[in-house]
Amino acid sequence: SAAKIAILDLCIPTLKQLSESEYERLLQMLDWVIAADEKVDLFEFMLQHSLSRHLSSHFFSGKRKLDRGPGPTKGLSESGDILLSMMAWNGRDSKGAAKAFKFAVEGSTPFESRVPSLLPEDSLNSELVLAALAAFEEASPLVKKRILEMCGHAAAEDGVLTNEEAELLRVVADGIGTALPPFLS
């Protein structure tokens, strides 16, 4: 939902005015709220990742960094498979996911000269997604643009971009450190 994303964007400057201890408390409370139902939905994931990404560098620049990351990252090829599979499986059955994945990779240049492959839906988790985002965050602007375009193609394969797909694209763009194209902002 665009309204949630807009509100989050408006809150970031205000949240930068918190003290370091207030920021750590905010993250702790957010973790508790997210863990309460023992599952992480898309908005919770986006909120947690976005707050950490935009605020941790503000509160911990030049000091210890708050470790909320996944650890070692995979190569761009495997990371591309993870992000594209996440987009392809979103709200689709196996046939729809395969079609969306194929649509996303057709005509694109594979990362690291490897043909992309759709991962099983049950193999995807937040740790893998965070690792994939971290891998692409270190990539060149051209590579970031390419993966974001491919994710956009997977999301809009059916000609419709849902609010949830727009949120996912926002997570990807934010996570790799690039902007969404104006038509999605």
Image (cartoon, grey):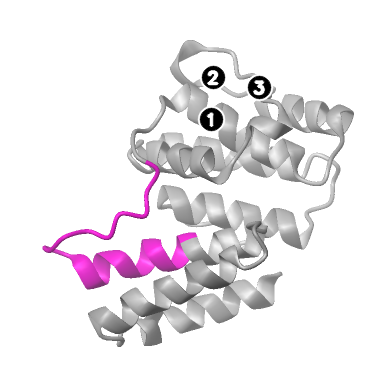
Q: Is residue 30 above or below residue 16?
A: above
Q: Residue at x 52, y 35 (%)?
A: 146
Residue span colored magenta: 49-70
Q: Residue at x 36, y 78 (%)?
A: 25
Q: Earlier in the sequence, mark 1 or mark 3?
A: 1
Q: Is residue 91 above or below residue 31?
A: above
Which image quarter holds the N terminus? bottom right
Horizontally, residue 48 falls left or right of residue 34, namely: left
Amino acid type at circle 1 is Gly
Q: Which dot marks residue 110?
A: 2
Q: Is residue 62 magenta?
A: yes
Determine the secondary structure under disc 2: loop
Residue carrying label 3: 107
- Observer-side mark, 2 or 1, equals 1
Amino acid type at circle 3 is Gly
Asked whether 161 or 88 is in front, the reply is 88
Residue carrying label 1: 80
